[in-house]
Amino acid sequence: MKKINIFINNLKFKAELNDTKIAAEIYKVLPIEADGNLWGNEIYFEIPLQMPNENPTENLDIGDLAYWPEGNCFCIFYGRTPVSTNNEPKPASSVTIIGKIKGNLEILKKLKEAKIKIIKI
């Protein structure tokens, strides 16, 4: 597991990337700064990486970090999305889970915009 910090506006969260190839490639291109897009309780933003899905899934838990190959995007899931059928997040299409963000994610549900910075610890 590779440890990272994710800054969302003025909030700092600890996170870990898993052992997927995609997570390893993302770790190599850090730091990343981006303007995040909000889609329900998901923040997503394009990153400088193009890879196919490694372990495609649509089954996510709150706090999952994922890579969405259709948009070359890093995704942070912290609750329901517009396509959720229960209280769990659901992506627009298959993603590869690349890690987990820790902390009280409820505060993210109040976001109107998201300035993102991800750094290695």
Image (spheres, rainbow, N blue to C red):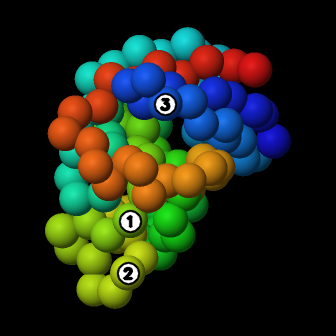
Q: Position of residue 87 (x, y in %)?
A: 37, 81
Looking at the image, which residue is at 52% across and 49% down? 65
Q: Position of residue 13 (x, y in %)?
A: 59, 36
Earlier sequence position, callout 2 versus callout 3: 3
Q: Position of residue 8 (x, y in %)?
A: 42, 30
Disc 1 to disc 2: CB gap under 8 Å: yes
Question: Which marked residue is nearer to the observer: mark 2 or mark 3?
Answer: 3
Quadrant of image for the C terminus: top right
Callout 1 secondary element: loop
Question: Which marked residue is nearer to the observer: mark 3 or mark 1?
Answer: 3
Q: Position of residue 58 (x, y in %)?
A: 41, 71
Q: Is residue 109 above or below residue 43?
A: below
Looking at the image, which residue is at 64% across and 49% down? 102
**Label 3 sits on residue:** 11
Callout 2 secondary element: loop
**Label 1 sits on residue:** 79
Residue 47 shows in the view: no
Residue 41 found in image quarter: bottom left
Instruction: Give the label on residue 25, or none.
Output: none
Farthest residue in the bottom direction?
Answer: 86
Q: Is residue 121 above or below residue 51?
A: above
Q: Amino acid at mark 3?
A: Leu
| Of the pair 94 and 114, the residue shown nearer to us | 114
Q: Is residue 94 left or right of residue 70?
A: right
Residue 37 shows in the view: yes
| Of the pair 120 and 51, the residue shown nearer to us | 120
Callout 3 secondary element: strand
Spatial CA distance of label 1 from label 2 is 7 Å
Looking at the image, which residue is at 68% across and 29% down? 4
Spatial CA distance of label 3 from label 1 is 17 Å
**Label 2 sits on residue:** 87
